[in-house]
Image: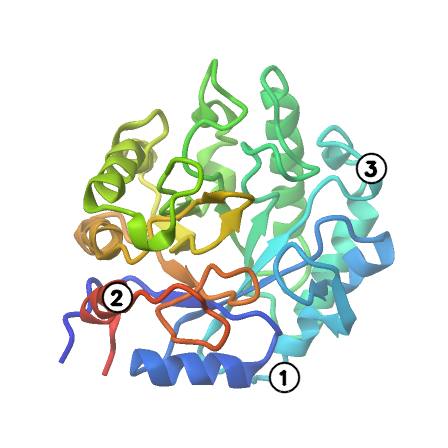
């Protein structure tokens, strides 16, 4: 029997909002997952926002008439929905989240509660320290972000029937916030249920390096950076410990795609998988984690799906050894 790395709840992202895809993944894993990730579009209309409309795939367009309520009706069973929720919709800002968009947020909450999803884990404005989303936070705007985030969480917690959990969710590193660090955006213990960090094995390889040419030394260098950079894996563990909050990893996985001539990932990188398993399994903080399986973007495995062009048998074996439930 594989050595499951910890008692931490495990989840997965499989695009398409289909329970059959989750069940197929559970066959690979050898047992049930505890969390199911899904995403709302980054720039929804207000009607889409209030309906909890889902994307076709993460960072993609809205799905045809598909809303978060599609996960309702008891089909999740004991699994819990983890929903990535956009902020600053329709060209607004974090300043508007301090009251200006309340009617939209309350309608959204009512939709989830009405679908039986009032216990969903909400990742509001995920990866806000990066530069790639409309709700990004730049240096000097931390307090505006904090005010807006606090207001939204307090508003949603007060809705009838709501029992949401709120995952405060930066991405690894300081991102836009090089002067004060991402921790300068921490909104307060009263509005954070767990600290969630998105982490992937970016290998920082030279232009033109093929996946098959990624060396163990390259993989180790990338891991060392992720363990020691400002707002590193170790840094987030320390922050979570200081605030007595669970440390979660809402998204983690292998980077298996190219950008122009650059191969960006660590290839078949079992060391990264084992390092994450050690961190998750050795944590005294609790928390949960979810592996990324979006084959449409190429950030997949371990699942052997059609269309994945970079084999990763060693990483797959390391994952099952750590997290398999068979």
Label 1: few (<14), some or many (≥20) within 10 Å?
A: few
Mark 1 = which residue? 73
Mark 3 = which residue? 91
> Label 1 to label 2, Cα distance in Å?
32 Å
- In percent of width and height, residue 36 lies at 49, 69
> Label 2 to label 3, Cα distance in Å?
41 Å
Q: Secondary structure at mark 2?
A: helix
Please state which of the two labelled residues, at mark 1 or mark 3, is closer to the viewer: 3
Q: Secondary structure at mark 3?
A: helix
> Closer to the N terminus: mark 1 or mark 3?
1
Mark 2 = which residue? 319
Badge 2 vs badge 3, beta-carbon distance below 8 Å: no
> Closer to the N terminus: mark 2 or mark 3?
3
Seen in the image, is 261 located left or right of residue 248?
right
Q: Is residue 244 above or below residue 75?
A: above
- In percent of width and height, residue 234 lies at 26, 35
Label 3: few (<14), some or many (≥20) within 10 Å?
A: few
Q: Toward which corner of the image does residue 154 lie, by quadrant?
A: top right
- In percent of width and height, residue 101 lies at 80, 42
Identify the image quadrant of the N terminus.
bottom left
> Label 1 to label 3, Cα distance in Å?
33 Å
> Closer to the N terminus: mark 1 or mark 2?
1
Q: Secondary structure at mark 1?
A: loop
- In percent of width and height, residue 8 lies at 29, 62
Seen in the image, is 161 located left or right of residue 100?
left
Seen in the image, is 320 located left or right of residue 179?
left
- Residue shown at 75% from the left, 50% from the top: 105
Q: Toward which corner of the image does residue 288 lie, by quadrant?
A: bottom left
- Residue shown at 51% from the left, 67% from the top: 295
Q: Is residue 225 above or below residue 60?
A: above
Numbered mark located on residue 312 in the image = none
């Amino acid at each position: 029997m594989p050595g499951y790395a910890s008692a931490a709840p495990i989840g997965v992202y499989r695009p398409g909002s289909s329970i059959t895809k989750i069940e197929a993944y559970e066959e690979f894993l050898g047992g049930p997952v505890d969390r199911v990730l899904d995403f709302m579009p980054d720039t929804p209309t207000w009607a889409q926002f209030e309906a909890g409309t889902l994307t076709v795939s993460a960072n993609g367009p809205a799905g045809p008439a598909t809303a978060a309520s599609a996960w309702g009706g008891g089909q999740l069973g004991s699994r819990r929905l983890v929903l990535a929720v956009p902020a600053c919709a329709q060209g607004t800002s974090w300043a508007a989240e301090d009251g200006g968009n309340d009617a939209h947020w309350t309608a959204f909450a009512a939709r989830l509660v009405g679908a039986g999803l009032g216990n969903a884990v909400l990742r509001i404005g995920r990866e806000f320290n990066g530069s790639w989303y409309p709700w990004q936070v730049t240096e000097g705007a931390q307090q505006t972000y904090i005010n807006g985030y606090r207001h939204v969480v307090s508003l949603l917690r007060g809705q009838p029937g709501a029992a949401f959990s709120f995952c405060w969710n930066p991405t690894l590193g300081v991102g836009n916030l090089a002067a004060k660090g991402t921790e300068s955006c921490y909104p307060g213990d009263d509005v954070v249920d767990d600290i969630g960090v998105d982490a992937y094995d970016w290998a920082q390889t030279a232009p033109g390096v093929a996946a098959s040419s990624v060396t163990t030394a390259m993989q180790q260098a990338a891991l060392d950076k992720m363990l020691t950079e400002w707002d590193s894996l170790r840094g987030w563990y320390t922050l979570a410990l200081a605030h007595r909050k669970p440390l979660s990893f809402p998204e983690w996985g292998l980077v298996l795609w190219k950008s122009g001539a650059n191969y960006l990932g660590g290839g078949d990188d079992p060391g990264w998988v084992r390092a994450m398993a050690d961190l998750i399994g050795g944590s005294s903080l609790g928390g949960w984690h979810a592996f990324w399986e979006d084959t449409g973007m190429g950030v997949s495995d371990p699942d052997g799906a059609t269309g994945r062009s970079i084999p990763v048998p060693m990483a797959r074996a390391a994952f099952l050894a750590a997290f398999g439930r068979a």
